[in-house]
Image (cartoon, helix red, strand yellow):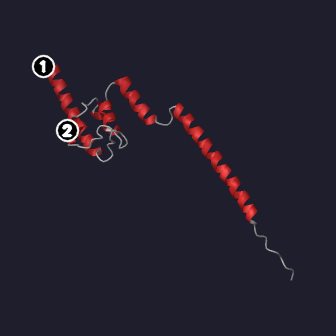
Amino acid sequence: MPDHPHHHPTNATIKYVLIVLAILLVALCVFLFIQYQSLRREQLIGGRTSFLSALRRDHGPLGANDIATIRPWMTFDYVNYLFAVPPDYVRTTLNITDPRYPHLTISTFTVQVEDALRSYLGHAATSTSTTSSST
C-alpha cells in the first residue's frame, strides 16, 4: 500500500491567507463607510425624520388622527414639534423629572405620550370649536 503524504498547510501559508483576509476586511469596511456617507448625503438614511418634518412643514402640525405616527425613537422635543404641543405640556402631564428632557427618547413613555397628546389635542379641538362657534 503506497504511503500518501498528508498535506498540512505551513505556518507561512496560514499567515498569507490571514493577511489577505485582513486586507479584504479593511477594504470592505472602507467601502461600507463610503456607501453609508453617500446614502446619508442623498437623505435615504434618516428618511423617517425627513418625511415627518416635511409633512409638518407642508401641512402644519399633526393632529389627533396622526398619533399613530409616534415611534419610540422620537424625542419629546420632536413630538412637541410635530404636534405643536407646548414644550412642557408632556413633561408636566407625565411628571418627568429627567434633566435630559426634552432631548430624551419617548421609548419608555410611548403609550403615555400618545394618551397625553390625545387629551391635549382633544382639548385644543374642543376649545377651538367653542371659541369659533361663540363668535
Question: Residue 16 location in percent, x, y?
Answer: 73, 57
Which of these two is toward me, 15 or 38?
15
Q: Secondary structure at mark 1?
A: loop
Q: Are marks 2 and 1 in contact (CB under 8 Å)?
A: no
Q: Crowding near pointer 1: few (<14 within 10 Å), some, many (20+)?
A: few
Among numbered discs 2 and 1, the one appearing first in the sequence: 2
Residue identified by numbered label 2: 92
For this view, does 95 lie left or right of residue 4?
left
Residue 37 lies in what quarter of the image?
A: top right
Q: Residue furthest top?
A: 135
Kindly tell me whether residue 62 is visible in this rendering: no
Q: Secondary structure at mark 2?
A: helix
Q: Residue at x 65, y 45 (%)?
A: 27
Q: CA distance from mark 2 to mark 1?
A: 30 Å
| Quadrant of the rendering where the C terminus is positioned | top left
Residue 7 lies in what quarter of the image?
A: bottom right
Kind of residue at badge 1: Ser
Which of these two is toward me, 130 or 100?
100
Kind of residue at badge 2: Thr
Question: Residue 29 location in percent, x, y?
Answer: 60, 46
Question: Taking 105 as reference, is 12 above or below it?
Answer: below
Residue identified by numbered label 1: 134
Question: Residue 89 location in percent, x, y?
Answer: 22, 35
The total number of labels drawn is 2
